[in-house]
Image: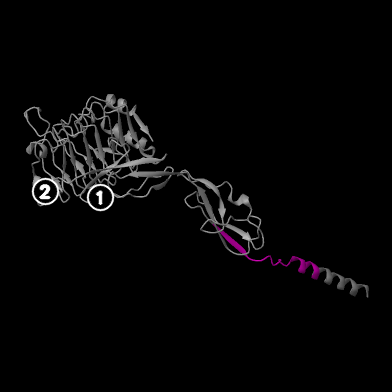
């Protein structure tokens, strides 16, 4: 009898132990997905049904590279409902990061054209400005000052409120121009003309354009007379600027249209009054071309700064040798370093002739590679002087 009781007790104990070892039904596991909205990525979290998502799971807070300040996680994509970390998770969930940005306002002074509304720009962002319209006028550009002397640079991130001033010119009469299949073969403005607006549709300015048409600054070697044109407004349709096209021009500023892919030797040689050399937004410029005679492309002794667009990939020797006053040169290309594809047989680019500017600015991402490209083609003296002035930004 005792044996039977003992066996029965052991059976009951074993049954209780087996039942206690069976897994408990704790419910499903849910996935919480995080949308950082431009910030650092955070891996999805797994949360057991009915439990809350611990804040430590999303710490540290995400960061963003464009100046935004993190405000918190929200339960909706519209960022109206802050997420409650104390509530139980009962289904898969999506969380969205909310950011705060300082914003600045750009106001526009249209100078006779129809008004356009002010534009809000996030701090650190680049403005995207469409060209305005004004019947019977040509839009030249936006300027920072009422006198229209300081050109607005749309490649510089906005850091304050701005007022921009529109500059307009009236089209030059069609009778001034002879155009042959897109090439401007003749330009005959009357004496006393300051500004020539080259019409849309022109794709090519031929070699020696200014000198061939007598539009140059008078008193230059071999050219005692000239119409002394102070500015040419180039059309967006322009694709080719011939060699020597603006040699001895009296221009004070030039704005290169976006479709121009290369600049050739002698093109702006002897432009003694030139103080502003800029490129259109979206410029496709790829190359500064050199030649065997080591002739400069830009010979502008009063030019103090120039910024080449991100599209520029190749720079030849001596191409800026006529710019003895240059203090700051910027190469905006960040995808890869600018390559010096023209150099002397024994080494040497002498980009600025014997002059060295105060600084050469390149994006931080390519600074070391840019210096390495210089080392490949420059001898020690030139390389040491150029390396010393390269700055990352």
Looking at the picture, tell me which residue is in the foreground, 89 or 315. 89
The numbered mark at residue 174 is 2
The percent position of residue 147, horizontal first and vertical second, equals 28, 35
- Nearer the viewer's eye, disc 2 or disc 1? 1
**Magenta span includes 107:** no
Quadrant containing the C terminus in the rendered view = top left
Q: CA distance from mark 2 to mark 1?
A: 19 Å
- Residue 134's label in the rendered image is 1
Residue at image location 30% in from the left, 43% down from the top: 310
- Residue 287, percent from left and from top: 22, 41
Q: Which residues are magenta?
A: 15-33
Q: Residue at x 37, y 50 (%)?
A: 117
Res. 59 visible in picture? yes
Determine whether the residue tagged by mark 2 lies in a helix, strand or loop: helix
Tell me which numbered mark, 2 or 1, is placed earlier along the sequence. Answer: 1
Image marks 2 and 1: residues in contact by CB distance under 8 Å: no
* Residue 29 lies within the magenta run: yes
Rendering coords of residue 195 (x, y %) = 17, 39
Instruction: Count up the numbered dots.
Output: 2
Q: Secondary structure at mark 1?
A: loop
The image quarter in which residue 146 lies: top left
Which of the two residues, 184 or 172, is positioned nearer the viewer here? 172
Q: Determine which quarter of the picture holds residue 91.
A: bottom right
Question: By what rule are the colours in the image chosen?
Answer: one colour
The 10 Å Cα crowd at callout 2, few under 14, some 14 to 19, many 20 or more, is few
> In screen coordinates, is 107 left or right of 322?
right
Residue with the most extreme right position: 1
């Amino acid at each position: 009898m005792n044996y039977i009781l003992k066996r029965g007790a052991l059976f009951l104990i074993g049954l209780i132990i087996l039942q206690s070892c069976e897994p408990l039904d704790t419910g499903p596991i849910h996935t919480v997905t995080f949308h950082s909205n431009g910030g650092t990525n955070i891996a999805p979290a797994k949360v057991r049904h009915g439990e809350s998502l611990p804040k430590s799971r999303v710490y540290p807070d995400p960061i963003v590279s464009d100046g935004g300040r993190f405000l918190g996680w929200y339960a909706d994509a519209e960022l109206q409902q802050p997420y409650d970390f104390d509530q139980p998770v009962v289904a898969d969930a999506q969380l969205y990061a909310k950011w705060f940005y300082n914003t600045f306002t750009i106001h526009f002074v249209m100078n006779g054209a129809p008004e356009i509304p002010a534009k809000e720009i996030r701090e650190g962002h680049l403005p995207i400005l469409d060209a305005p319209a004004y019947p019977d006028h040509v839009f030249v550009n936006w300027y920072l000052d009422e006198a229209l002397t300081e050109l607005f640079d749309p490649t510089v991130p906005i850091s304050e409120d701005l007022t921009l001033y529109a500059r307009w010119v009236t089209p030059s009469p069609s009778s001034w121009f002879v155009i042959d299949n897109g090439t401007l073969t003749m330009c005959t403005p009357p004496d006393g003309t300051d500004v020539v607006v080259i019409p849309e549709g022109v794709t090519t300015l031929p070699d020696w354009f200014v000198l061939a048409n007598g539009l140059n600054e008078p008193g230059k070697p071999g050219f005692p007379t000239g119409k002394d044109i102070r500015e040419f407004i180039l059309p967006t349709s322009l694709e080719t600027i011939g060699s020597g096209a603006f040699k001895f021009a009296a221009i004070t500023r030039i704005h290169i249209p976006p479709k121009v892919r290369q600049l050739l030797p002698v093109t702006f040689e002897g432009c003694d009054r030139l103080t502003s050399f800029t490129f259109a937004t979206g410029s496709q410029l790829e190359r500064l071309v050199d030649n065997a005679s080591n002739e400069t492309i830009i010979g502008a002794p009063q030019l103090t700064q120039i910024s080449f667009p991100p599209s520029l990939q190749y720079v030849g020797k001596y191409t800026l040798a006529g710019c003895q006053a240059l203090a700051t040169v910027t190469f905006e290309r960040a995808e890869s370093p600018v390559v010096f594809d023209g150099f002397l047989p024994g080494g040497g680019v002498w980009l600025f002739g014997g002059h060295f500017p105060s600084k050469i600015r390149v994006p931080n991402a390519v600074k070391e590679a840019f210096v390495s490209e210089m080392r490949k083609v420059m001898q020690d003296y030139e390389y040491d002087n150029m390396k010393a002035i390269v700055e990352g930004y």
